[in-house]
Amino acid sequence: MTQKIILNIKCLDQMGIVADVTRFLYDSDFNIIESTQFNDANSKQFFMRIEAENLKADIDDLTRYLAETFYNIANKYNIEFTFYDANKPIRTLLMVSKLDHCLEDVLHRYRLNSLNIEITSIVSNHLNAKRIADFNNLPFHHLPISKDTKDQQEAKLRKIIENENAGLIILARYMQILSDKISAEYSGRIINIHHSFLPSFKGARPYHQAYGRGVKIIGATAHYVTKDLDEGPIIEQDIEHITHAMVPKELIAIGRDIERRVLSRAIRHHTEHRIIIDENRTIILR
């Protein structure tokens, strides 16, 4: 298999960055097959994603080797950078409560090999999803939670994440609020799908709220989880136009379809390493 790498960089915009970075890859026997960059006129920041394939070398830990040899350029321009193995799927933990439409969609795409993930297990605070885990031959962890057991439940969750070496946690309609501690510990590694076009209609029964307000669009938002509830960096959003004639049941059906496609696009962006987090926003180098 051809060794492919992805390099993401972030730094202040300066002359010579692209020339030096591409020369480095050329000298390391890499052929660039995709390159995307963004210059932020407001912050003067420069963002770049390069995907390249190795033509000659056969190095076991290629990303580590590249990171070590890239430091001269990184220091010259004060670059924040990460090398990724493009062929390596991200070990992914799925979390869900009772609603399973997003979970089923992710599993379907996983079976079709359309997402660069390796699902390690399914975690839920209910037993509803056990049959889905069994059908897909995946381990299932039942972690019930109450106000008095939240700390113990999250300790068990943390142990599962570490034991399974999960690099990504997907909240596929997991309807519990994660603690500030675990949100910070796995910052940039937890993706949530929110059942509204944030920041509108937070909380319970969002489609009933939308119906009562006579809205003309509904949507969904995928974002990274932070300690600030539903205010983490937004990855993907989508909407559908609706009319006054639609009742909440119809809005729910439309909304669930939006949630599925928004979450899958967010997962794809993340697992293809197209996202660079810049404070509380995302730069997505498509």
Image (spheres, rainbow, N blue to C red):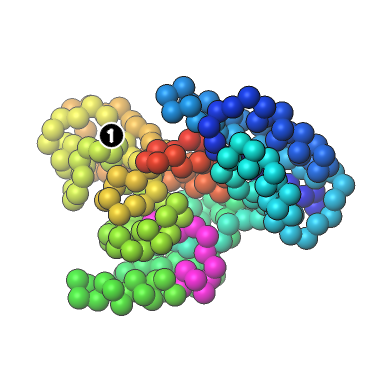
Query: Which residue is found at the position 51% from the left and 41% from the top?
Result: 275
> Quick check: can you spot residue 30?
yes
Q: Which residues are magenta?
A: 160-171
Query: Which residue is found at the position 39% from the left and 71% from the top?
Result: 157
* In the image, residue 243 above or below residue 249: above
Q: Which residue is mark 1?
A: 218
In screen coordinates, is 7 left or right of 241?
right
Total numbered labels placed on residues in the image:
1
State the residue lying farthest toward the front.
76
Q: Is residue 227 magenta?
A: no
Which of the pair 81/199 is nearer the observer?
81
Residue 7 falls in image quadrant: top right
In screen coordinates, is 265 left or right of 180?
right
Counting from the top left corner in percent of width and height, residue 248 is at: 20, 41
Counting from the top left corner in percent of width and height, residue 197 is at: 29, 37
Residue 49 falls in image quadrant: top right
Counting from the top left corner in percent of width and height, residue 60 is at: 78, 60
Counting from the top left corner in percent of width and height, residue 101 is at: 39, 53
